[in-house]
Protein backbone atom coordinates (compact mmCIF):
# COMPACT_ATOMS: atom_id res chain seq x y z
CA UNK A 1 0.00 0.00 0.00
CA UNK A 2 1.38 3.41 -0.91
CA UNK A 3 1.05 6.48 1.27
CA UNK A 4 1.45 10.17 0.68
CA UNK A 5 4.35 10.36 3.14
CA UNK A 6 7.38 12.39 2.11
CA UNK A 7 10.94 12.34 3.29
CA UNK A 8 12.77 15.37 4.68
CA UNK A 9 14.32 16.28 1.33
CA UNK A 10 10.77 16.33 -0.05
CA UNK A 11 11.76 14.52 -3.19
CA UNK A 12 9.32 11.75 -2.31
CA UNK A 13 9.58 8.08 -1.71
CA UNK A 14 10.15 5.18 -4.02
CA UNK A 15 6.76 3.87 -5.02
CA UNK A 16 7.95 0.31 -5.44
CA UNK A 17 8.80 -0.68 -1.89
CA UNK A 18 6.57 -1.17 1.10
CA UNK A 19 9.33 0.23 3.29
CA UNK A 20 9.57 3.53 1.50
CA UNK A 21 12.98 4.89 0.75
CA UNK A 22 13.53 8.26 -0.87
CA UNK A 23 15.34 7.84 -4.19
CA UNK A 24 17.12 11.17 -3.64
CA UNK A 25 18.28 11.09 -0.04
CA UNK A 26 17.94 7.38 0.70
CA UNK A 27 16.02 8.21 3.88
CA UNK A 28 12.85 6.53 5.06
CA UNK A 29 11.83 9.13 7.65
CA UNK A 30 8.18 10.02 7.35
CA UNK A 31 7.06 13.59 7.79
CA UNK A 32 3.39 12.62 7.68
CA UNK A 33 1.02 10.08 6.28
CA UNK A 34 2.17 6.85 7.96
CA UNK A 35 0.82 5.80 11.31
CA UNK A 36 4.15 4.56 12.65
CA UNK A 37 7.50 6.32 12.74
CA UNK A 38 10.08 4.77 10.45
CA UNK A 39 12.57 2.17 11.62
CA UNK A 40 15.43 4.55 10.96
CA UNK A 41 13.77 7.39 12.90
CA UNK A 42 13.33 5.11 15.88
CA UNK A 43 16.89 3.95 15.67
CA UNK A 44 18.10 7.52 15.50
CA UNK A 45 15.91 8.42 18.45
CA UNK A 46 17.36 5.52 20.38
CA UNK A 47 20.81 6.75 19.46
CA UNK A 48 21.73 3.36 18.13
CA UNK A 49 22.35 4.04 14.47
CA UNK A 50 21.85 0.84 12.49
CA UNK A 51 22.07 -1.40 15.49
CA UNK A 52 22.52 -5.12 15.16
CA UNK A 53 20.08 -7.27 17.05
CA UNK A 54 22.00 -9.74 19.19
CA UNK A 55 21.31 -13.32 18.16
CA UNK A 56 21.32 -14.71 21.66
CA UNK A 57 20.70 -13.32 25.07
CA UNK A 58 18.44 -10.66 26.47
CA UNK A 59 17.10 -7.80 24.40
CA UNK A 60 16.91 -4.25 25.66
CA UNK A 61 13.61 -2.45 25.20
CA UNK A 62 15.11 0.06 22.78
CA UNK A 63 16.65 -2.71 20.72
CA UNK A 64 13.22 -4.23 20.34
CA UNK A 65 11.54 -1.22 18.74
CA UNK A 66 12.26 -1.10 15.04
CA UNK A 67 15.83 -2.16 14.44
CA UNK A 68 17.46 -3.17 11.21
CA UNK A 69 20.61 -5.21 11.56
CA UNK A 70 23.58 -4.01 9.48
CA UNK A 71 23.51 -7.21 7.43
CA UNK A 72 19.95 -6.40 6.40
CA UNK A 73 19.86 -2.66 5.77
CA UNK A 74 17.05 -1.04 3.79
CA UNK A 75 17.40 -2.90 0.50
CA UNK A 76 17.64 -6.49 -0.69
CA UNK A 77 20.52 -8.33 0.90
CA UNK A 78 22.50 -11.50 0.22
CA UNK A 79 22.42 -14.53 2.45
CA UNK A 80 24.43 -17.73 2.38
CA UNK A 81 22.49 -20.79 1.30
CA UNK A 82 23.08 -24.40 0.25
CA UNK A 83 21.66 -25.46 -3.08
CA UNK A 84 21.25 -28.51 -5.27
CA UNK A 85 22.23 -27.70 -8.84
CA UNK A 86 20.92 -30.93 -10.32
CA UNK A 87 19.20 -34.13 -9.20
CA UNK A 88 22.54 -35.78 -8.54
CA UNK A 89 25.06 -33.00 -7.76
CA UNK A 90 26.04 -32.65 -4.10
CA UNK A 91 24.78 -29.60 -2.23
CA UNK A 92 27.08 -26.60 -2.47
CA UNK A 93 27.16 -23.04 -1.08
CA UNK A 94 25.07 -20.50 -2.98
CA UNK A 95 24.21 -16.85 -2.42
CA UNK A 96 20.53 -15.98 -2.28
CA UNK A 97 19.26 -12.43 -2.57
CA UNK A 98 16.57 -11.81 0.08
CA UNK A 99 14.06 -9.06 -0.56
CA UNK A 100 14.08 -5.66 1.12
CA UNK A 101 12.13 -5.78 4.36
CA UNK A 102 8.53 -4.78 3.65
CA UNK A 103 6.29 -3.15 6.22
CA UNK A 104 4.75 -6.51 7.19
CA UNK A 105 7.90 -8.58 6.84
CA UNK A 106 10.11 -10.17 9.42
CA UNK A 107 13.73 -11.17 8.88
CA UNK A 108 14.57 -14.48 10.50
CA UNK A 109 18.07 -15.65 11.28
CA UNK A 110 17.72 -19.37 10.64
CA UNK A 111 18.91 -21.48 13.57
CA UNK A 112 17.57 -24.90 12.57
CA UNK A 113 16.01 -26.38 9.45
CA UNK A 114 14.67 -29.91 9.16
CA UNK A 115 15.18 -32.14 6.13
CA UNK A 116 11.81 -33.36 4.88
CA UNK A 117 11.44 -36.11 2.29
CA UNK A 118 9.62 -33.51 0.17
CA UNK A 119 12.96 -31.69 -0.13
CA UNK A 120 14.37 -34.87 -1.63
CA UNK A 121 11.42 -35.42 -4.00
CA UNK A 122 11.80 -31.84 -5.22
CA UNK A 123 15.55 -32.00 -5.79
CA UNK A 124 15.25 -35.39 -7.48
CA UNK A 125 12.51 -34.09 -9.80
CA UNK A 126 9.98 -36.68 -8.59
CA UNK A 127 7.15 -34.15 -8.93
CA UNK A 128 8.34 -32.49 -12.15
CA UNK A 129 11.41 -30.59 -13.22
CA UNK A 130 12.52 -28.18 -10.48
CA UNK A 131 14.13 -24.79 -11.04
CA UNK A 132 17.77 -25.45 -10.23
CA UNK A 133 19.51 -24.27 -8.17
CA UNK A 134 17.02 -25.44 -5.55
CA UNK A 135 17.40 -24.26 -1.96
CA UNK A 136 14.99 -26.54 -0.06
CA UNK A 137 13.91 -26.29 3.56
CA UNK A 138 10.43 -25.75 5.03
CA UNK A 139 10.93 -26.71 8.66
CA UNK A 140 12.57 -23.49 9.78
CA UNK A 141 13.09 -22.11 13.27
CA UNK A 142 15.07 -18.96 13.86
CA UNK A 143 15.49 -15.66 15.62
CA UNK A 144 13.72 -12.52 14.42
CA UNK A 145 16.45 -9.97 13.71
CA UNK A 146 14.44 -7.21 12.01
CA UNK A 147 10.79 -6.32 11.58
CA UNK A 148 8.95 -4.03 9.18
CA UNK A 149 7.14 -0.94 10.40
CA UNK A 150 3.68 -2.55 10.44
CA UNK A 151 4.61 -5.85 12.08
CA UNK A 152 2.46 -6.64 15.11
CA UNK A 153 3.04 -10.33 15.81
CA UNK A 154 6.81 -10.26 16.41
CA UNK A 155 9.51 -8.21 18.03
CA UNK A 156 13.21 -8.44 17.42
CA UNK A 157 14.62 -11.27 19.51
CA UNK A 158 11.50 -13.46 19.27
CA UNK A 159 11.78 -17.00 18.00
CA UNK A 160 9.73 -17.67 14.86
CA UNK A 161 9.06 -20.63 12.63
CA UNK A 162 8.32 -20.93 8.93
CA UNK A 163 6.70 -23.99 7.42
CA UNK A 164 5.79 -24.98 3.89
CA UNK A 165 4.34 -21.72 2.60
CA UNK A 166 5.28 -18.07 2.61
CA UNK A 167 2.43 -16.33 0.79
CA UNK A 168 -1.13 -16.64 -0.53
CA UNK A 169 -3.74 -14.20 -1.83
CA UNK A 170 -5.45 -13.84 1.56
CA UNK A 171 -8.76 -13.08 -0.14
CA UNK A 172 -10.14 -16.23 -1.75
CA UNK A 173 -12.63 -18.44 0.09
CA UNK A 174 -9.95 -20.95 1.03
CA UNK A 175 -7.59 -18.33 2.43
CA UNK A 176 -10.49 -16.77 4.32
CA UNK A 177 -11.22 -20.22 5.76
CA UNK A 178 -7.63 -20.42 7.08
CA UNK A 179 -6.60 -22.85 4.36
CA UNK A 180 -3.84 -20.85 2.75
CA UNK A 181 -2.31 -24.09 1.49
CA UNK A 182 -5.31 -24.34 -0.84
CA UNK A 183 -5.26 -20.72 -2.05
CA UNK A 184 -7.31 -20.48 -5.24
CA UNK A 185 -4.82 -18.05 -6.74
CA UNK A 186 -1.90 -20.31 -5.93
CA UNK A 187 -0.11 -20.75 -2.64
CA UNK A 188 3.51 -19.62 -2.65
CA UNK A 189 5.41 -22.53 -1.19
CA UNK A 190 8.60 -21.85 0.73
CA UNK A 191 10.93 -23.08 -1.99
CA UNK A 192 10.96 -23.72 -5.73
CA UNK A 193 7.69 -21.85 -6.23
CA UNK A 194 7.10 -18.71 -8.31
CA UNK A 195 7.83 -15.77 -6.02
CA UNK A 196 5.01 -13.25 -6.54
CA UNK A 197 6.78 -10.56 -4.53
CA UNK A 198 10.33 -10.61 -5.87
CA UNK A 199 9.99 -12.56 -9.12
CA UNK A 200 11.98 -15.70 -9.81
CA UNK A 201 11.47 -18.61 -7.44
CA UNK A 202 11.42 -18.94 -3.69
CA UNK A 203 14.41 -20.23 -1.76
CA UNK A 204 13.90 -22.10 1.49
CA UNK A 205 15.50 -22.65 4.84
CA UNK A 206 18.78 -24.28 3.87
CA UNK A 207 20.02 -20.73 4.25
CA UNK A 208 21.13 -18.36 6.96
CA UNK A 209 18.33 -15.80 6.66
CA UNK A 210 14.83 -15.63 5.27
CA UNK A 211 12.36 -12.76 4.84
CA UNK A 212 8.70 -13.61 5.25
CA UNK A 213 5.42 -11.79 5.77
CA UNK A 214 4.54 -11.99 9.45
CA UNK A 215 1.28 -13.84 8.69
CA UNK A 216 3.31 -16.81 7.47
CA UNK A 217 5.63 -16.85 10.46
CA UNK A 218 4.64 -18.97 13.46
CA UNK A 219 5.22 -17.95 17.08
CA UNK A 220 7.39 -20.44 18.94
CA UNK A 221 6.53 -20.44 22.65
CA UNK A 222 9.38 -20.06 25.11
CA UNK A 223 10.99 -23.18 26.50
CA UNK A 224 10.69 -25.33 23.40
CA UNK A 225 13.71 -27.28 22.19
CA UNK A 226 14.23 -25.32 18.99
CA UNK A 227 15.99 -28.03 16.96
CA UNK A 228 13.36 -30.61 17.85
CA UNK A 229 10.55 -28.12 17.17
CA UNK A 230 11.64 -27.35 13.59
CA UNK A 231 10.17 -30.60 12.14
CA UNK A 232 6.78 -29.76 13.62
CA UNK A 233 6.47 -26.97 11.02
CA UNK A 234 5.90 -29.63 8.35
CA UNK A 235 5.90 -33.16 9.79
CA UNK A 236 3.85 -31.96 12.77
CA UNK A 237 1.15 -30.02 10.96
CA UNK A 238 0.85 -32.59 8.16
CA UNK A 239 -0.03 -35.35 10.61
CA UNK A 240 -1.94 -33.17 13.12
CA UNK A 241 -4.31 -31.81 10.47
CA UNK A 242 -5.89 -35.17 9.51
CA UNK A 243 -6.26 -36.07 13.19
CA UNK A 244 -8.20 -32.84 13.64
CA UNK A 245 -10.26 -33.18 10.48
CA UNK A 246 -11.21 -36.83 11.13
CA UNK A 247 -11.64 -36.01 14.84
CA UNK A 248 -9.39 -38.71 16.21
CA UNK A 249 -10.70 -39.37 19.70
CA UNK A 250 -9.33 -40.93 22.84
CA UNK A 251 -9.66 -44.71 22.62
CA UNK A 252 -10.00 -44.81 18.82
CA UNK A 253 -7.61 -46.96 16.88
CA UNK A 254 -5.18 -45.31 14.51
CA UNK A 255 -2.51 -46.92 12.38
CA UNK A 256 0.56 -45.05 11.18
CA UNK A 257 1.97 -46.55 7.99
CA UNK A 258 5.68 -45.73 7.66
CA UNK A 259 7.61 -44.42 10.63
CA UNK A 260 10.04 -41.82 9.34
CA UNK A 261 9.99 -38.05 9.94
CA UNK A 262 6.22 -37.64 9.57
CA UNK A 263 5.36 -41.05 10.95
CA UNK A 264 7.17 -40.76 14.26
CA UNK A 265 5.61 -37.34 14.94
CA UNK A 266 2.21 -38.83 14.03
CA UNK A 267 2.75 -41.51 16.68
CA UNK A 268 3.52 -38.91 19.35
CA UNK A 269 0.54 -36.72 18.39
CA UNK A 270 -1.88 -39.65 18.36
CA UNK A 271 -0.56 -40.96 21.69
CA UNK A 272 -1.12 -37.49 23.17
CA UNK A 273 -4.80 -37.77 22.16
CA UNK A 274 -4.93 -41.11 23.99
CA UNK A 275 -5.73 -42.94 20.79
CA UNK A 276 -4.62 -46.56 20.52
CA UNK A 277 -1.69 -46.38 18.12
CA UNK A 278 -0.25 -49.12 15.92
CA UNK A 279 2.76 -48.59 13.67
CA UNK A 280 2.92 -50.49 10.40
CA UNK A 281 6.55 -50.54 9.39
CA UNK A 282 8.93 -52.16 6.94
CA UNK A 283 11.85 -51.79 9.40
CA UNK A 284 12.27 -54.37 12.20
CA UNK A 285 14.65 -52.01 14.02
CA UNK A 286 11.86 -49.45 14.53
CA UNK A 287 9.55 -51.72 16.49
CA UNK A 288 11.13 -50.96 19.85
CA UNK A 289 11.26 -47.22 19.06
CA UNK A 290 7.54 -47.18 18.25
CA UNK A 291 6.75 -48.69 21.63
CA UNK A 292 9.08 -46.23 23.34
CA UNK A 293 7.11 -43.40 21.70
CA UNK A 294 3.89 -44.80 23.13
CA UNK A 295 2.52 -47.00 20.35
CA UNK A 296 0.60 -50.02 21.63
CA UNK A 297 2.29 -52.19 19.06
CA UNK A 298 4.29 -52.09 15.85
CA UNK A 299 3.99 -54.71 13.17
CA UNK A 300 5.92 -55.45 10.04
CA UNK A 301 4.15 -55.27 6.70
CA UNK A 302 5.53 -58.74 6.06
CA UNK A 303 3.94 -60.21 9.21
CA UNK A 304 0.98 -62.00 7.63
CA UNK A 305 -0.41 -63.21 10.97
CA UNK A 306 -0.47 -59.72 12.45
CA UNK A 307 -2.01 -58.26 9.31
CA UNK A 308 -4.75 -60.90 9.50
CA UNK A 309 -5.32 -60.26 13.19
CA UNK A 310 -5.69 -56.51 12.56
CA UNK A 311 -8.35 -56.90 9.82
CA UNK A 312 -11.23 -54.45 10.42
CA UNK A 313 -9.37 -52.89 13.36
CA UNK A 314 -8.71 -49.22 12.58
CA UNK A 315 -10.84 -46.09 12.61
CA UNK A 316 -8.12 -44.15 10.83
CA UNK A 317 -4.93 -44.95 8.96
CA UNK A 318 -2.37 -42.28 8.15
CA UNK A 319 0.04 -43.25 5.42
CA UNK A 320 3.36 -41.42 5.26
CA UNK A 321 5.05 -43.75 2.78
CA UNK A 322 6.81 -41.64 0.14
CA UNK A 323 6.21 -44.00 -2.76
CA UNK A 324 3.19 -45.71 -4.28
CA UNK A 325 2.63 -49.19 -2.80
CA UNK A 326 -0.09 -51.85 -2.54
CA UNK A 327 -2.69 -50.17 -0.33
CA UNK A 328 -5.37 -52.86 -0.46
CA UNK A 329 -3.80 -54.95 2.36
CA UNK A 330 -4.03 -51.83 4.56
CA UNK A 331 -7.59 -51.06 3.45
CA UNK A 332 -8.49 -54.49 4.83
CA UNK A 333 -7.43 -53.21 8.23
CA UNK A 334 -10.06 -50.43 8.29
CA UNK A 335 -13.33 -50.75 10.16
CA UNK A 336 -16.63 -49.98 8.48
CA UNK A 337 -16.54 -46.26 7.56
CA UNK A 338 -12.82 -46.07 8.25
CA UNK A 339 -10.53 -43.74 6.30
CA UNK A 340 -7.02 -44.14 5.00
CA UNK A 341 -5.48 -40.68 4.68
CA UNK A 342 -2.53 -40.61 2.33
CA UNK A 343 -0.16 -37.77 3.17
CA UNK A 344 2.91 -39.53 1.79
CA UNK A 345 2.96 -40.58 -1.85
CA UNK A 346 2.02 -37.47 -3.83
CA UNK A 347 2.74 -38.85 -7.31
CA UNK A 348 0.35 -41.24 -9.06
CA UNK A 349 -0.82 -44.08 -6.83
CA UNK A 350 0.04 -46.52 -9.59
CA UNK A 351 0.67 -49.44 -7.23
CA UNK A 352 -2.36 -48.91 -4.96
CA UNK A 353 -4.33 -51.82 -6.50
CA UNK A 354 -7.51 -50.97 -4.58
CA UNK A 355 -10.62 -53.13 -4.70
CA UNK A 356 -13.72 -51.05 -5.46
CA UNK A 357 -15.86 -53.91 -4.17
CA UNK A 358 -14.12 -54.03 -0.77
CA UNK A 359 -14.22 -50.25 -0.53
CA UNK A 360 -17.94 -50.26 -1.26
CA UNK A 361 -18.83 -53.05 1.17
CA UNK A 362 -16.93 -51.43 4.01
CA UNK A 363 -17.94 -47.87 2.98
CA UNK A 364 -14.25 -47.11 3.38
CA UNK A 365 -12.60 -43.92 2.20
CA UNK A 366 -9.29 -43.05 0.68
CA UNK A 367 -8.34 -39.43 1.25
CA UNK A 368 -5.38 -37.11 1.03
CA UNK A 369 -4.32 -34.12 3.07
CA UNK A 370 -1.85 -31.32 2.44
CA UNK A 371 -0.01 -29.72 5.38
CA UNK A 372 -2.39 -27.34 7.20
CA UNK A 373 -3.25 -23.64 7.29
CA UNK A 374 -1.32 -21.05 9.27
CA UNK A 375 -3.80 -20.98 12.17
CA UNK A 376 -3.68 -24.76 12.43
CA UNK A 377 0.12 -24.72 12.23
CA UNK A 378 0.17 -22.30 15.16
CA UNK A 379 -2.26 -24.64 16.92
CA UNK A 380 -0.02 -27.70 16.54
CA UNK A 381 3.00 -25.76 17.78
CA UNK A 382 1.08 -24.55 20.84
CA UNK A 383 -0.32 -28.05 21.36
CA UNK A 384 3.18 -29.54 21.31
CA UNK A 385 4.57 -26.80 23.57
CA UNK A 386 1.87 -27.53 26.16
CA UNK A 387 2.52 -31.28 26.07
CA UNK A 388 6.27 -31.32 25.59
CA UNK A 389 6.01 -33.04 22.21
CA UNK A 390 9.04 -32.78 19.94
CA UNK A 391 10.66 -34.67 17.11
CA UNK A 392 13.56 -37.07 17.57
CA UNK A 393 16.31 -35.29 15.69
CA UNK A 394 19.86 -35.80 14.54
CA UNK A 395 21.74 -32.55 14.04
CA UNK A 396 23.97 -32.15 11.00
CA UNK A 397 26.11 -29.39 9.55
CA UNK A 398 25.26 -27.84 6.15
CA UNK A 399 28.11 -29.73 4.48
CA UNK A 400 26.42 -33.02 5.40
CA UNK A 401 23.12 -32.42 3.56
CA UNK A 402 23.90 -34.71 0.63
CA UNK A 403 24.80 -37.66 2.88
CA UNK A 404 21.68 -36.97 4.96
CA UNK A 405 19.50 -37.18 1.80
CA UNK A 406 20.94 -40.63 1.07
CA UNK A 407 20.25 -41.85 4.58
CA UNK A 408 16.64 -40.61 4.47
CA UNK A 409 16.03 -42.39 1.16
CA UNK A 410 17.49 -45.59 2.67
CA UNK A 411 15.23 -45.30 5.77
CA UNK A 412 18.33 -44.68 7.88
CA UNK A 413 17.31 -41.53 9.76
CA UNK A 414 16.09 -41.66 13.39
CA UNK A 415 13.88 -39.75 12.86
CA UNK A 416 14.56 -36.31 11.37
CA UNK A 417 17.78 -34.70 10.24
CA UNK A 418 17.95 -31.06 11.25
CA UNK A 419 20.57 -28.70 9.85
CA UNK A 420 22.24 -26.85 12.70
CA UNK A 421 22.96 -23.25 11.75
CA UNK A 422 22.90 -22.18 15.39
CA UNK A 423 26.24 -23.66 16.43
CA UNK A 424 28.18 -21.68 13.82
CA UNK A 425 26.37 -18.47 14.75
CA UNK A 426 26.95 -19.00 18.45
CA UNK A 427 30.70 -19.05 17.92
CA UNK A 428 30.66 -15.73 16.02
P1 LIG B 1 10.75 -40.29 5.60
O1 LIG B 1 11.34 -39.68 6.80
O2 LIG B 1 11.64 -40.82 4.54
O3 LIG B 1 9.76 -41.45 6.10
C1 LIG B 1 9.07 -42.28 5.21
C2 LIG B 1 8.92 -43.67 5.83
O4 LIG B 1 8.11 -44.46 4.95
C3 LIG B 1 10.22 -44.43 5.94
O5 LIG B 1 10.96 -44.14 7.08
C4 LIG B 1 9.72 -45.86 5.98
O6 LIG B 1 9.25 -46.15 7.29
C5 LIG B 1 8.48 -45.84 5.09
N1 LIG B 1 8.71 -46.48 3.78
C6 LIG B 1 8.08 -47.57 3.32
N2 LIG B 1 8.48 -47.88 2.09
C7 LIG B 1 9.41 -46.99 1.76
C8 LIG B 1 10.22 -46.83 0.61
N3 LIG B 1 10.12 -47.63 -0.47
N4 LIG B 1 11.09 -45.82 0.59
C9 LIG B 1 11.20 -45.00 1.66
N5 LIG B 1 10.44 -45.11 2.78
C10 LIG B 1 9.56 -46.11 2.84
O7 LIG B 1 9.79 -39.26 4.86
P2 LIG B 1 8.92 -38.07 5.50
O8 LIG B 1 9.73 -36.84 5.54
O9 LIG B 1 8.24 -38.58 6.69
O10 LIG B 1 7.86 -37.83 4.33
C11 LIG B 1 7.02 -38.89 3.94
C12 LIG B 1 6.25 -38.52 2.69
O11 LIG B 1 5.31 -37.51 3.01
C13 LIG B 1 7.10 -37.95 1.56
O12 LIG B 1 6.63 -38.48 0.34
C14 LIG B 1 6.83 -36.47 1.61
O13 LIG B 1 7.00 -35.83 0.38
C15 LIG B 1 5.40 -36.46 2.04
N6 LIG B 1 4.94 -35.23 2.67
C16 LIG B 1 3.68 -34.84 2.42
C17 LIG B 1 3.18 -33.73 3.02
C18 LIG B 1 1.77 -33.33 2.80
O14 LIG B 1 1.40 -32.19 3.11
N7 LIG B 1 0.91 -34.21 2.31
C19 LIG B 1 3.98 -32.96 3.87
C20 LIG B 1 5.27 -33.41 4.12
C21 LIG B 1 5.74 -34.55 3.53
P3 LIG B 1 9.37 -47.64 7.86
O15 LIG B 1 10.84 -47.86 7.98
O16 LIG B 1 8.65 -47.53 9.14
O17 LIG B 1 8.71 -48.57 6.89
ZN1 LIG C 1 7.89 -31.30 4.52
Image (cartoon, helix red, strand yellow):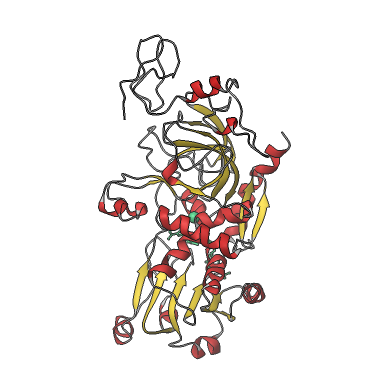
Count the numbered circles shown.
0
The C terminus lies in which quarter of the figure? top right
Relative vertical location of residue 123 with respect to residue 282 in this rendering, above or below? above
Left or right: residue 3 versus residue 351 is: left
Extreme residue toward the left, this view: 173
Nearest the viewer among 196 and 134 is 196
Residue 146 percent across, percent down from the top left: 53, 33
- At 35% across and 24% down in the image, what residue appears? 16
Q: Is residue 319 left or right of residue 367?
A: right
Q: Position of residue 71 (x, y in %)?
A: 58, 26
Give the residue at x 45% y 16%.
Answer: 27
Identified at 43% across, 67% down, the residue is 324
- Left or right, 269 with respect to 358, comes to right
Compare residues 95 and 247 and report the one nearer the observer: 247
Give the image location of residue 402, x and y in percent: 61, 48
Where residue 57 sits, quadrant-wise, is top right
Above or below, 188 against 49 in this view is below
- Front residue (pair 233, 80): 233
Residue 344 in view of the camera: no
Residue 343 sits above or below residue 178 on the image: below
Location of residue 261 with respect to 314 vertically, above or below: above
Q: Position of residue 255 (x, y in %)?
A: 49, 77
**Residue sitting at x 62%, y 72%:** 293
Residue 378 seen in this snapshot:
yes
Image quarter of the N terminus: top left
- From the viewer's perspective, tell me whether residue 377 is left or right of residue 414: left
Q: In which image quadrant can residue 247 be found?
A: bottom left
Amino acid sequence: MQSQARCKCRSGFSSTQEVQVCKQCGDDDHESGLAEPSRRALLKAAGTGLAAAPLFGAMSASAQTRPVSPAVGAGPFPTRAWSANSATAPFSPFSVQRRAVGAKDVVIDVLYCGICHSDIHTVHGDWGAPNYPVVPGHEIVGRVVAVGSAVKKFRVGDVAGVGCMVDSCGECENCLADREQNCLKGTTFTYDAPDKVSGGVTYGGYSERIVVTEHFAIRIPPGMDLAATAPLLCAGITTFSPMQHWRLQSGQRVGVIGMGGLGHVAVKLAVARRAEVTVLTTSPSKIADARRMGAREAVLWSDADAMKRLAGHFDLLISTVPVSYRMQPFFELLKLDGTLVNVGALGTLSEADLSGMAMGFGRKSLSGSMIGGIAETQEVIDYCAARNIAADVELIQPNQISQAFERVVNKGVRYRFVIDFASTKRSV
